Image (tube, grey):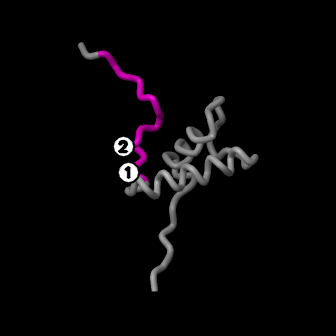
Amino acid sequence: MPKSRKHMVEPTIDDLLETIPSKYKLVCLAAKRARELTEGAPAGVPDEGDKPTTIALKEIQAKKIGFVQPETR
């Protein structure tokens, strides 16, 4: 029986890419949100002692934050 592997980051990147289909946009969104959390913004998901980056990723997975594509001319 295979051992279950604990991922280093929860949620996994594969799960997050279902919400934000671009790795570049995902990283930019998570980084911006993590900075906001570090500066004192309230978390949109329960804070379980996680670091700001993990909280940002959990917010993305829960669809509490997202990316809006600007209109092109």
- The answer to whether 35 appears left or right of 39 in the picture is left
SS class of the residue under badge 2? Answer: helix
Q: Quadrant of the N terminus?
A: top left
Numbered-mark total:
2
The three-letter amino acid code for the residue at tag 2 is Asp
Q: Nearer the viewer, residue 34 or 18?
A: 34
Give coordinates of residue 12: x percent, y percent: 41, 38
Q: Residue at x 41, y 24 (%)?
A: 6
Residue at image mark 2: 14
As for residue 47 lying within the magenta part, the answer is no
Q: Residues within 10 Å of mark 1 (few under 14, many from 20)?
A: few
Q: Amino acid at mark 1?
A: Glu
Q: Residue 50, image x and y in percent? A: 62, 32
Q: Label 2 vs label 1: CA separation?
A: 7 Å
What residue lies at 53% left-to-right and 58% top-to-bottom?
A: 66
Q: Residue at x 34, y 20 (%)?
A: 4
Label 2 crowd (10 A; few <14 / some 14-19 / many >=20): few
Question: Which image quadrant for residue 15?
Answer: top left
Discs 2/1, front: 2
